[in-house]
Amino acid sequence: MGKLLLYGIRPTKTLAWLLAIFTVPVGGMLFYFILGRNRRKNKFYTLKKTKEISQYYKKVETYYNTLDSAKNSNVPLAIKKHIKLAKLITKGSKFLPSLGNELIPLKNGKATFDAIFTALSTAKKFIHIQYYIFEEGDLAEKFKTLLISKAKEGVEVRFLYDALGSRTLSNNYINSIKKEGIKVYSFLPMRLGRLLSSINYRNHRKIIIVDGIVGFTGGINVSDKYIKGDPDLGNWYDMHLQLSGAIVNSLQAVFAMDWTFASGNDTLLNTKYIVKQTTTGNVIAQIVASGPDSDFSSIQQLYFSIINSAKEYVYITNPYIIPGEALLEALQVAAMSGIDIRLLLSKNSDSFLVKWNVRSHFEQLLEAGVKIYLYPDGFLHSKVIVSDNALTSIGTANLDIRSFEQNYEVNALIYDTKITKKLKSDFLKDCDKSSQIDYNLYLKRSKIDRIKEGLAKVFSPIL
């Protein structure tokens, strides 16, 4: 209990845990041990400070100090316009904004996997793959065939999967690729000795790197439902991102840190996996990564900063909007200040508890003037924010406490007008297909629905 009082937990959260412990002592302590510990104070691992890493951190510090002078001629205009945001992400996530990139948003499963398989087929040196959910099926078989083929050509192939998210992945599948020379590790495996201390902290990232030249990240896992649909929910709608240019080195660094932790091998910290990049486009972008043991909740800070600094609009697409106190208030304040705040969520849900927890926040948001739309078809799984025709965030992180505090996540922050305007247009078209929730009608919802919301809200910290 001493750790509960000492280590940086918000007062409201501390009181909730104390109440649980005093009410049900054994059960409360057990749940706190599994779900409540502050991993920012008690880290799973600390990356070994190699010479290269120390030099990189000095570069980050130098760049951060450069940003203090917004008049510096070396700072691009898009960064100058969002200097506080760039400084925040540089300080918190330790990744620099990079210039000269090409970023291609990929809508839904077919476009995403077509692009991924095309890129994988070009690999000459190495392929790095990381997924939260990797389900066996037609897509997984296509991955296996292609990866084995590349391994036989001499390409280094590394495959990292989350032990809980990919718990249905069979030993037969894993062994069939291992025996062909593919290196495979699971992230935080479900071993009895550390099960209670690690089960709640999962790696939700989806990353592919091909030769350090092309990268992919976003919301799409490997599952046939992205191609064939889900028998219960219908078609899955999601957003992924293809990246080329210097930004790929930042994404590779995220994979390297996760691989080093999971494998115990620091091979990927070697600079040979950091590729000298050529200019492939004109997009400025920045990788934002955070996890339960990172120094700061960088993705939560990213979302908060975008909302707080908006001048005209913030449009958010996300299936799981359970914002917590800070972001809830940020959304309310922005809407009450005249900013056009819109939330687009799926009408259908893959979880009863999550559905009603999400809806438990609707009344407060609607009252403040936030516009909420429910997408009627299938399941909308995208995690996208666009703001002021200038900023876009695409990645793996939901807008909930689990993504901010308990999962390892990665997003790309894009400082680009063209991409933002295109995704804004797509968002508005999706809103036209959706039903907007009327505040006055919502106030008349049934007592049963209110009870469901209230009961589900209790579980916010663990959803």
Image: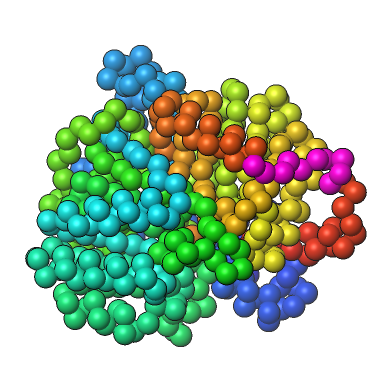
Q: Nearer the viewer, residue 193 or 162?
A: 162
Count of numbered circles on the image: 0
For image coordinates 87% across by 63% down, the residue present is 448
Q: Is residue 141 left or right of residue 34?
A: left
Image coordinates of residue 138 in percent, x first then y, are 37, 71
Image coordinates of residue 96 in percent, x first then y, are 32, 37
Quarter of the rendering occupied by the C terminus: bottom right
Query: Which quadrant of the view contains residue 367?
Result: top right
* Residue 435 magenta-highlighted: yes
Decide: is 148 above or below 274. Answer: below
Q: Nearer the viewer, residue 390 or 151?
A: 151
For image coordinates 12% across by 56% down, the residue present is 124
For image coordinates 33% across by 21% down, the residue present is 76
Colour treatment of the image: rainbow
Quarter of the rendering occupied by the N terminus: bottom right
* Residue 448 magenta-highlighted: no
For image coordinates 39% across by 73% down, the residue present is 137
Decide: is 65 above or below 70. Answer: below
Read off the magenta span: 433-442
Residue 323 appears in view: no
Image coordinates of residue 378 in percent, x first then y, are 60, 57
Image coordinates of residue 208 in percent, x first then y, are 30, 56
Q: Residue furthest left?
A: 154
Q: Is residue 334 left or right of residue 38?
A: right
Residue 208 appears in view: yes
Q: Nearer the viewer, residue 366 or 378?
A: 378
